[in-house]
Every structure is written in C-alpha cells, then in structure tokens.
Image (cartoon, grey):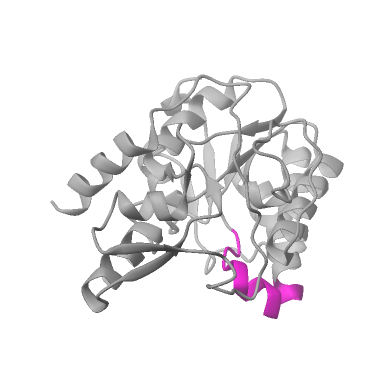
Amino acid sequence: MVVGTIKALIIGSNGMLGSDLCNMFPYAVKLTHRDLDITNKEQVLGSIQRIKPDVVINAAAYTDVDGCEDNQELAFQVNGYGPGHIAEACSKVGALLVHFSTDYVFDGSRNEYIESDTPNPINVYGQSKLLGEQKIAENTENYRIIRISWLFGIHGKNFVETMLKLSTQMDRVKVVNDQFGKPTYTVDLANKITDVLELEAGIYHLTNEGVCSWYEFASAIIDNVVPCTSEEFPRKAKRPKYSVLVNSKTEPMRHWRAALEVYMKERNK
C-alpha cells in the first residue's frame, strides 16, 4: 500500500507517537484532542463520515498509568469506549482501523506473550485498554490492533528524558530492576505501520527487539543509576513483572539499543 495513495486520518496527531505517524503519513488529515473528543460518539461518527478516510490511525489514549487509578471513568471512556466509537464509524465508511494497545493487558506472570495469549490486566490502565480492544472487535471487522510497550520518542515526555533530567538533579537515580519489557522507539513503530496495513485483520505485537529491566534501560541512558526493587519504589498502579511482547506475526525491528543510539543523536541535534 503506497502512503501517498491512501486517504489517512490520524487521531491524536500531536502526541509522541502521533507526531511520528504524521511524518510517516504527511498527507493525512490530522486531528488532536481539541479537534475531536473520542469519548463523544456523535462527534466521532460525524467527523469520520465527513472525512471518509481509507484508513484511520488512532493514537489517542490516556496513558498516565497511575493517573488511571484515580480517574477510572476517564480511563475507560478514552481507552475503552472511545476506540469503540471510532471502530463503529470506520465500519460505516468502510475504513480500516489501526489502533494501539499495550503490553499492560497482560498480568506479567509469564516471561513473554504472543498475540493469542489471554489478557489479564492487573491495573486500570490495562483494563481500559483491553476494553478498547474488545469494543473495536465488536464494532468492526477491518482492524489492526497493535500492542506496544515502553515507548520513547522525540515528541513527548518519556522514560529517556525523565532519566536524563533526574540524572542532573540527583546523585543517584533509583530504578526498579524487577520489571522486564521491550523499549520501543516511536519512529521505528511509525515506519512499520504501512507493513501492517497489508496484513490480515487482527492483533499484532510491535516492539523493538531486546528484553531488559527498567534498570538496564536506564543504565544505557545515564551513569548514576542504582537498582532497586518494586517494593522499594511503590506506585499507585500495580505493574506486571514481565510485559515482554513477542512479535510472532511480523518481521522483527532493530534492537532497542540501536534505536536508543539514533534517538540520542536526534535529540542532541
């Protein structure tokens, strides 16, 4: 599928991932939260029926994992029912829906997960994102749900920037060494979407290669990091110990260390 020949709509176009998707689809119609409230069903149906896109890429989400515990209704509206509204609208106009879900739909009791494994989220964020997956499947057949993990990108707040900032403010930065996942560069993810459009409907795992703990990830970014346990660093939302997604249906992307190297050069320009 040639990017220039499809009429794409990107929802959540000003976010970290959305910004890189806009670079990948320069001719897309781009909508931010100010332009479209995905929790408003009538607004979603009206906008998508008016635009009549071939492909809708939904990068809008409420991603504050701890915040979701305090704002559960908002989390379920934005991450759960909102994607369902988009899916219904896509079905009406015959558009393909690409939607981003999360590794946090799993409970972390296994070392790794493939696309067909049964979700069992242990926090509100994961529960709300799983509801989004379910609502999409209920409302359209032509969808690509992409589960992603540990995103970092130039256009938003992320773990890399947090580490760099804390490194200058503290003598030692404590980071947990008992939660494992796959860091993923938003540019690599955005570049992979055209491949996904060619695949059959369903759920896909897309991450950079390489498994690490948050501590190992931090160690690749700053020098003054020290390991700690999750018990030493309590958070409002429970995190899965292992949220390692296996890309079993697509060609693997480069290692996260190689992607991080590119990111660091890009941010230092």
From the top left corner, tell me how far across and down residue 208 is, in percent. 45, 35
What residue do we see at 77% from left, 30% from top? 116
Whether 177 is among the magenta residues is no
* Position above or below: 16 against 29: below
What residue do we see at 63% from left, 23% from top? 248
The front one of 169 and 265 is 169
For residue 257, say whether it is visible: yes
Q: In the current view of this chain or complex, which residue is farthest to the right?
A: 138
Chief secondary structure of the magenta portion: helix
For residue 39, say whether it is visible: no
The front one of 15 and 121 is 121
What residue do we see at 48% from left, 56% from top? 177
- Quarter of the image for residue 254 reads top left
What residue do we see at 60% from left, 65% from top? 62
Provide the residue span drawn in magenta.
61-74
Q: In the current view of this chain or complex, which residue is farthest to the left?
A: 269
From the top left corner, tell me how far across and down residue 201 is, in percent. 72, 26
- Quarter of the image for residue 37 reads bottom right
- Quarter of the image for residue 142 reads top right
From the top left corner, tell me how far across and down residue 27 is, in percent. 40, 39
Q: Is residue 67 left or right of residue 43?
A: left
* Position above or below: 180 against 236: above
Q: Is residue 121 left or right of residue 184?
A: right
From the top left corner, tell me how far across and down residue 229 is, in percent. 53, 64
